[in-house]
Amino acid sequence: MRQKGIRIVHGMHEDTAEKSCIMMLLISLLLLVIALFLGGCSTEKTEELSAVEGLDALGAVQVVSREEGSGTRSAFAELAGFDESEEDGRADATTDDALVVSDAGEVIEAVREDASAIGYISMGSLGALEQEKVLAVDGADGTTANVKSGSYAISRPFVLAWSGTLNELEQDFLTYIEGKGQEIVGESYVAVSKTTTFLSGQQSGTITIHGSTSAAPLLEELAESYMAINTHATVEVVASDSTSGLNDAMQGTCDFGMASRELKDYEKELLDYKVIAKDGIAVIVNGENPLTGVTTEELKALFTGTIENWDDLNEARSGS
């Protein structure tokens, strides 16, 4: 009996030892997978931050910026980390040497004509590019798919805002955008809800929408589609900038203000609003620029003038 008892205890020790060996093997394999993953990430980051041959030939960086009041500018400055300025009256810390333009088309034209230029546009305007390049940011390509997945961080909402109670026509139009209209949203942007069927109340009247030049093309397309369904309605879209559109909505000079940025706290207090789409902000350079990607920290340095020459970017990457 004693020997049998010893054998049982011995068997338990063998079983425990075997389990321990298996556990140690699994832990070792897990650590190996983690090491390989981190090693791959480290290699990718090193390649992304390495010096770029031919960048020194471009000379001084020409920053192309949107105007103050632009929702695209506001969102881009916030996401890249330079939305606060030490100078009174300045919306952000964009360099004083920037070429300031009023819409995406002018940004593209300026970048197209100057090999040293860098700018930013709505991804909804990517179809207008010719030889210009879209840069990856923090290792993620500037595509709508990456905005949708969350891997591309330079993105912002498109917002419709209004003051007071919507009338039946305005509510009908908003219901269309939030449902059936999401099919149109998803063609060039990221939809924020599922596409549904829509049956209009066929109310008559006119709807006026003021604001963002980036959101305007989408709202124009949505307006045309809605008016084809409700032939008794007229929807007028007037492009200016996000801040002006929201101010007009507050003052009652339009029915909806359209913005291509998050609303500020005081705007949220004075207006009701709906996010109708999500849009990425693409960073573009001239086709002759050999650069393929940047980090958000580099964007901040470039657009604030901390990096003044393209070769300075190479020096910063090499640590010299």
Image (tube, rainbow, N blue to C red):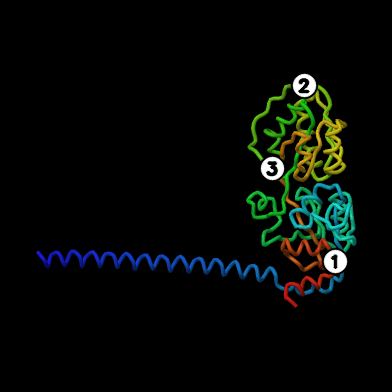
Dot 2 lies on which element? loop
- The residue nearer to you, when weighing 249 against 269, is 269
Graded by Cα atoms within 10 Å as few (under 14), some (14 to 19) or many (20 or more), the crowding at tag 1 reads many
Disc on the earlier residue, 1 or 2 = 1
Residue at x 79%, y 64% (from the top left corner): 301
Measured from the top left, where is residue 102 in percent x and y?
Answer: 88, 49
Amino acid type assigned to the residue bearing label 2 in the image: Gln
Dot 1 lies on which element? loop
Residue at x 80%, y 72% (from the top left corner): 312
Disc on the earlier residue, 1 or 3 = 1
Question: Distance from label 2 to label 3 (Cα)?
Answer: 26 Å
In the image as oriented, which residue stretches furthest toward the left?
A: 1
Measured from the top left, where is residue 160 in percent x and y?
Answer: 76, 37
Q: Determine whether, in the image, residue 137 is placed left or right of residue 13.
A: right
- The residue nearer to you, when weighing 242 against 83, is 83
Measured from the top left, where is residue 98 in percent x and y?
Answer: 88, 60
Q: Which residue is mark 3?
A: 186
Question: Distance from label 1 to label 3 (Cα)?
Answer: 35 Å
Q: Which residue is mark 2?
A: 203
Measured from the top left, where is residue 57 in percent x and y?
Answer: 84, 73
Q: Which residue is mark 1?
A: 61
Residue 195 sits in which quadrant? top right
